[in-house]
Amino acid sequence: MIGNFDARVPSGPLDRKWTSHKDHSRLVSPNNRRKFEIIVVGSGLAGGSAVATLGELGYRVRCFCYQDSPRRAHSIAAQGGINAAKNYQNDGDSIYRLFYDTIKGGDFRSREGNVYRLAEVSSNIIDQCVAQGVPFAREYGGLLANRSFGGAQVSRTFYARGQTGQQLLLGCYQALCRQIAAGTVQMFPQTEMLDVVVVDGHAKGIVTRNLRTGKIDNVAADAVVLATGGYGNVFYLSTNARGCNVTATYRAYKKGALFANPCFTQIHPTCIPHSGDYQSKLTLMSESLRNDGRVWVPKRKEDCNKAPNEIPEADRDYYLERKYPSYGNLAPRDISSRAAKEVCDEGRGVGPGGRGVYLDFADAIKRVGEQTIRERYGNLFEVYEKITGENAYQVPMRIYPAVHYTMGGLWVDYNLMSNIPGLFVIGEANFSDHGANRLGASALMQGLADGYFVLPYTLPNYLAGQMGKRPSTDHAEFKKADNDVRAKIDNLLKINGKRSLDSIHRELGTLLWDKCGMARNKAGLEEALRKIPELRERFWREVRVPGDGEDFNQSLERAGRVADFLEFAELMCLDALARDESCGAHFREEHQTPEGEALRDDDNFADVFAWEFQGNPATAGPKLHREALRFETVHLAQRSYK
Ligand SMILES: Cc1cc2nc3c(=O)[nH]c(=O)nc-3n(C[C@H](O)[C@H](O)[C@H](O)COP(=O)(O)OP(=O)(O)OC[C@H]3O[C@@H](n4cnc5c(N)ncnc54)[C@H](O)[C@@H]3O)c2cc1C
């Protein structure tokens, strides 16, 4: 293995670890910072915040993204809010409580030290964003407003209507642009990273393709940061932006970076149901709606085809309130999703195909008035009406779980550095903080914590020992990576089959949804592991990639990403098969409590699974490394939201 597999969580009391780590980390003096070049791949909230901060510190940063502007990163889609332990509501919140909720929400499969740090810096994020002018919702008196998200009994979610990601990204983008103007940051939009270059065991560069001209470039640096987001689109249908993919992290994995917990996928309970075979994307209805919306299905199957207003109160099953009285409609996502699946599997689902449950605002409208609901969620109701043609102020929304977020990602230590020295991974692209299930409004918190407040301390600690070690792009490793990238592109263009990329990707997605989705079992995973290599083989024989590599060619871009998904899917299923327990969103049907909840096996699986690439999967499967999770503060318990 390249580098080593030590989590490097500092010793000492939980609430002193981060401060003492910062106090003892190495620094780079202001005059030396401009001598270092840093590559950041990704300009979403994680990448953008890191780039702006590192630029401000005086490093020379090159930032790459495949969109035409950093403003269009997938982070812009985030709707409901961002958590922080400010306790503005005086309702009992604290750093410890946010830490504990997150550890418990992740079903005790994340590192205490990382999660405590996340809770600790959460308040700074809000201050930073307010200073940038992010227009968070405010109370009548001018203080910032909060609402609740799943898995918490306090209100700690800061929001800007249903457009929190967009507003945060605007703040971050302004900070980024300021650095571009100051000359510390160079931005490379429409440029895709296709390989990481490792020189003498350290990440020292990348190979990119200009998506407008097809030009392949080699870029050397002192360190490489991947902030390339999640891989939910491996399922074809997800709430993610269409462009989200696994290519950057998967290709880093093939260069020796360990991939952690790849099977941990979040299925979000409140999405607009899938409506037809030609659909290419699913739409989220933010979890914030569950502050006021009540989830229900008819008690009797026979009522499922009736209009909802014809079903009297007594015949409705508010199943989340019934099963989880203390959290009710704000039960965490994994639990709420499974509960929706369960009632639909019983034949009590509503809408086409019986794959839907109601999210009903009638009570809230009666209580606070339509105008207040409009102010809180107006844009989400508009999105819903545009897609379904229904007015959710008058009839309940219909929702169903959908793939939304990936807790798995490249393995990183406490410094957010992968096992390859010099390769840092931040935001959704790493595996670090959410264990087996992420709580709502915690992804934005993590991405911005990583970019604004963690990496700017941990990256210098690495760079301090790297002065003068940046290689030239003439190095043989650059040549090799460059050749590999060109060969892969040529091979894709040579296939010249008849099948569309979408049809193969959709087939892969359906297989994964059925066998490695909301519920998994040994037989299903083994079946998927047999079928994925066959599908991959068909891809390389039958797919058609029109055009050439010397020009703007979106089919070629997509072909490379689908090819990577076809390999990565196998790693996900292997991981799901090897983790012979249920935890959080990873629900192995063989392991459940009598009430149908996930049944962990802490004796054998209180670990992070980190996989090492060993070459062609047909001849050498990946090697599993296990990082034992140490719980010094929290007591491992069966998660209960009753
Ligand atoms: C519909 C929706 C709503 C959400 N709402 C919330 C919410 O309310 N609260 C919350 O906390 N979370 C929410 N999330 C989750 C959250 O939005 C994401 O987890 C988070 O924004 C990810 O940020 P990121 O910076 O890690 O990645 P992204 O924003 O996905 O950015 C990835 C960046 O990497 C670049 N990139 C990727 N691969 C390459 C490559 N090979 N070469 C060059 N560039 C590359 C992209 O161009 C992009 O700039 C939501 C998610 C969805 C789908």
Image (cartoon, rainbow, N blue to C red):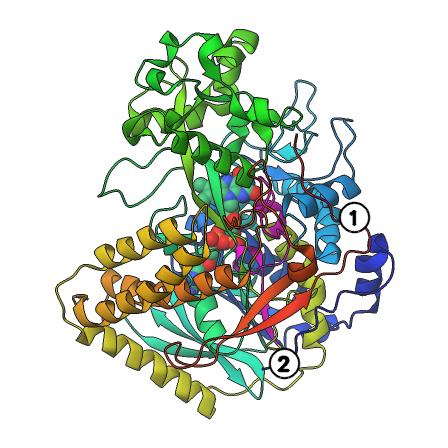
Return the residue nearer the eye: 160 or 437: 437
Q: Earlier in the sequence, mark 2 or mark 1?
A: 2
Which disc is residue 519 wearing?
A: none
Residue on which the image places disc 1 = 635
Q: Residue at x 73, y 73 (%)?
A: 28
Lateral position of residue 190 relative to residue 70, left or right: left
Residue range corresponding to the magenta coloring: 422-446
Q: Nearer the viewer, residue 590 or 588?
A: 590
Q: Secondary structure at mark 2?
A: loop
| Image: 158 above or below 172 | above
Task: Give coordinates of residue 221: x percent, y percent.
Answer: 54, 78
Nearest to viewer (mark 2 / mark 1): 1
Quadrant of the image containing the N terminus: bottom right
Residue placed at 30% from the left, 80% from the top? 486
Image vertical order of residue 123 relative to residue 406, above or below: above
Q: Amino acid at mark 1?
A: His
Q: Is residue 283 left or right of residue 467?
A: left
Q: Amino acid at mark 2?
A: Gly
Identity of the residue drawn at 74% across and 55% down: 112
Q: Secondary structure at mark 1?
A: loop
Image-quadrant location for residue 440: top right
Q: Does the magenta portion include 338?
A: no
The residue located at (47%, 91%) in the rendering is 475
Query: Alpha carbon of mark 2 to alpha carbon of mark 1: how far?
Result: 32 Å
- Residue 20 percent coordinates (x, y): 84, 62
- Tell me, yes or no, if residue 165 can be seen here: no
In this rendering, is residue 482 above or below 117? below
Magenta-colored segment: predominant secondary structure: loop
Q: Which residue is mark 2?
A: 3
Which quadrant does the C terminus fall into? top right
